[in-house]
Image (cartoon, rainbow, N blue to C red):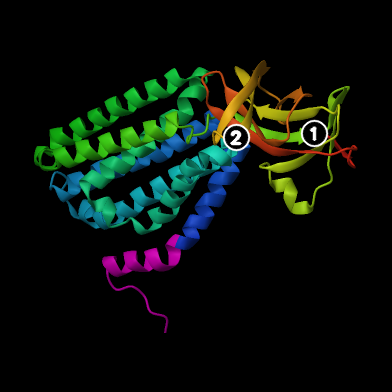
Amino acid sequence: MRYLPKSTEELLTWYERYVSPVTLIIGFSLDAFIVRNVDLLGSAFFLFGYLVIAGSGILLLNLILAGALLGRVWNAAAPFLPVVIQFAFGGLFSGFVILYSQSAALAVSWIFVVALALLLISNERFRKLYGRFAFQIGILFFGLFSFLTFSLPVLLTRIQTDTFVVGGVLSIFIIALYVRLIEYFIPALVRENRRTVLSVIGSIFLLVNVLYFTNAIPPFPLALKEAGVYHSIQKKGDTYVLEEEPRRWYEFYLRYHKAFHKAPGERVYVFTAVYLPADFSAQIFHQWEYHDKEAGEWIESGSYSFPITGGRSGGYRVYTFRQSIAPGKWRVNVRTEDGRIIGRVSFTIVATPEPVERVEKLL
């Protein structure tokens, strides 16, 4: 006969061991389907629902444990509330992984995306930690700050540093009101954990700001749909005809440090397609840089700006080119007006006496 859990704790352990990994996969797949098939405003409301569930669960759990809510129903519900909180944060972080990975240039933003992915995976083992007040408030604050970093540009149709700053201030204000609400019902709990909670919130706030201002957080909702270096670009109607060197199948997934064989008099083109939602507009830049071997650093060699508008699913297409360009390592940063990196195309110029074989690509 198959063994069945005999107590609440055994049931929760059984859930963690057997059901939790399955729900992680199902939940991530469901989030991916919903986030990718609704507009950004719909995604914001969807993720906000997870935040409300998590915040409500934390409040109820602490009220029950403090004896502020009495009765058999509340006592029976208490062991399951950490699972509900865990589920809500799992849904929230899986949504963030999907959304931010779509916008991320992995060369510069991989730290934040990987951190979200690790947090999502580790969340399945956090049930016992969700019983600790400082951890509850810390993870809620991180979720709130990340949510506002994503949702404010969507609501304001504005992609600037000031929206991030406003999001940070709002996060502090909202979490302070939330802790104040808990303190009204359970003053001893907040008083005992005040110093720890303040240090946790301060550390998270500092960390997120460092990640943002070092370009580790992608400039959502801008996303680089296409980027590459080409030998020729022509526009025919609404289609761009690009010529590039033949590549092996796996090289189509590599944007970085690709060899470009340049013959005398030939131009070097960098083409990008940047996605922006409808009703958005922005100024983007192609910032050309070369690597100075002696100095061991990247030197800017020119920057070109373009006004772009949103609404095209394949992204707003622009290109720049250089003709007089020395052999060596080069890269083109695709960035916003306030310096945020959307993506990057890196390549190595190799001088050749004759033009190399090319293949066409239509975009």
Q: CA distance from mark 1 to mark 2?
A: 34 Å
Where in the figure is residue 8, as x and y percent of width and height?
28, 65
The residue where tag 2 is placed is 38
The quarter of the displayed image where residue 303 is located: top right
Residue extending furthest toward the bottom: 1
**Residue situated in front as seen by the camera: 273 or 57:** 273
Residue at the (29%, 73%) spot, across then down: 6
Magenta portion: prevailing SS class = helix
Q: Position of residue 93 (x, y in %)?
A: 45, 44
Q: Report how many numbered discs are placed on residues in the image.
A: 2
Residue topped by disc 1: 230
Q: Give, as a single range, the part of the protein colored magenta.
A: 1-20
Q: Are there few (<14), some (14-19), or many (20+) residues within 10 Å of tag 1?
A: many
The vertical placement of 106 against 302, above or below, is: below
Q: Secondary structure at mark 1?
A: strand
Helix, strand or loop at disc 2?
A: loop
Residue closest to the eye, 81 or 340:
340
Q: Is residue 52 left or right of residue 236?
A: left
The answer to whether residue 91 is visible is no
- Vertical order, 91 against 334 (above or below): below
> At label 1, which amino acid type do we have?
Tyr
